[in-house]
Image (cartoon, rainbow, N blue to C red):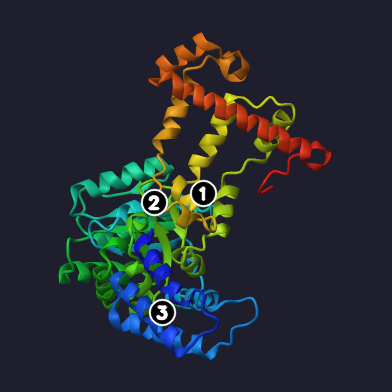
Amino acid sequence: MFENLQDRLDSAFKNLKGQGKITDLNIAATVKEIRRALVDADVNYKIAKEFTDKIKDKALGEKVINAVSPGQLMVKIVSDELTELMGGNVEDINIKGNPAVILISGLQGSGKTTFSGKLAYHLKSKLKRSPLLVACDVYRPAAIDQLKVLGEQVNVEVYSEIENKNPVQIAQNAIAYAKSKNYNVVIVDTAGRLAIDELMMDEIARVKQAIQPQETLFVVDSMTGQDAVNTAKAFNDKINFDGVVLTKLDGDTRGGAALSIKYIVDKPIKFVSRGEKLDTLDVFYPERMAQRILGMGDIVSFVEKAQENFDAKEAARLQKKIVKNQFDFDDFLGQLNQIRKMGNIKDLLGMIPGMGKALKDIDIDEGAFKKIEAMISSMTPTERANPDLLNGSRKNRIAKGSGSDIKDVNQFIKQFDEMKKMMKKMSTMAPGGKIKMPFK
């Protein structure tokens, strides 16, 4: 995410490395490189110019304090300005109302319908709301089916009227239905088009006027850069939406949309979406995103993700097994699944300060986990519970059963044994023989 921009900014800061103080000369060179980096990231030149002018004014007005180098000070200034450019503070979604109505808008292909499903999951699992999804895309035949599939995956009802081609009427009927069934949030998925046209704009404006939503969100593909910003402006001029949702952020190496959209439409980015899985929706925190862009990590988000997947009872059970040196393959597989629930491994590691740059050119093969799962699945229940039983013939059977080479099985078992020893060592070093479990 934003790898190209991160590399260019890092290169710009090198102009100040080794400098004893900030001067007109060295700050000018740095600011010039930052401006180029932003323009290359598909940020509008006017925005890039105004942004770097602010940085220059702040940098020249700052006195470098002891133990803070010019380079470190510049990173801090750029981080603050990036945060401000992307909105400053986190903006919550408005779900006040009975029911609260959320209108979803955007072009076809932006990920609008998938986002509707993700939002339903987010509201249900994290905010403990009872949402109803509404299919108001009456033009794309697969749209209603897609929303129903998503609804089934998150166990949320989908309201649709197959024969009705009037989205205004469908939305109004859905709200009445939601009231009768005690749903407290209604998410209305509207039709998209391949390009902006007056008919589409007039239709969604009529829907909004008829249902008076508490929240209108504009969904945009972040990978389209300035086109995303231009589309956002056209929609905002017509329907005056409340917030922006950036989708496909995991594929965006430049970052132009995230950096420009708040400046152009003066509306906050409220959510960012990565991938197709329904749990890959995050509230947008401008400060955290700025830190990630600058390679400073995002440890707060990392801890939050860990807490979401943390099971206190399971941790206590594992602690006892580790202390007694009884940690087995079933336990290992359970922990592996916990990590995978948190998301893409490389993306997660990138949240740890310093890891993003270290992993830049390293390809972390998610398929390696499948290979490990296959090996463990090829073991008998007795073998999984008693790792010491694994002799040569058993290893050969496991290799054949998992489609692996015997050397892969040996390597995995060796690593597992080393990990057990380390965990046991840590348990004996901890006060009272207790392991301090993280996030507890």
Mark 1 in CB contact with mark 3 (< 8 angstroms): no
Image coordinates for residue 380, horizontal then vertical, percent: 53, 14
Real-space Cα separation, disc 2 to disc 3, in angstroms: 25 Å
Seen in the picture, residue 132 relative to 296 is either above or below; the reply is above
Q: Say which of 291 and 138 sits in front.
A: 291
Q: What's the amino acid at mark 1?
A: Ser
Residue denoted by label 2 = 361
Residue denoted by label 1 = 125
Q: Residues within 10 Å of mark 1 (few under 14, many from 20)?
A: few
Q: Quadrant of the N terminus?
A: bottom left
Q: Residue at x 64, y 30 (%)?
A: 420
Q: Residue at x 50, y 26 (%)?
A: 411
Q: Residue at x 17, y 65 (%)?
A: 195
Real-space Cα separation, disc 1 to disc 3, in angstroms: 45 Å
Image coordinates for residue 261, horizontal then vertical, percent: 34, 73
Q: What's the amino acid at mark 3?
A: Thr
Residue 412: tell me if it is visible. yes
Q: Residues within 10 Å of mark 2 (few under 14, many from 20)?
A: few
- Pair 1/3: label in front: 3
- The quarter of the displayed image where residue 208 is located: bottom left
Kindly identify which numbered label has been placed on residue 30: 3
- Pair 2/1: label in front: 2
Query: Could you tell me which secondary element the residue under label 3 belongs to?
Result: helix
Q: What's the amino acid at mark 2?
A: Asp
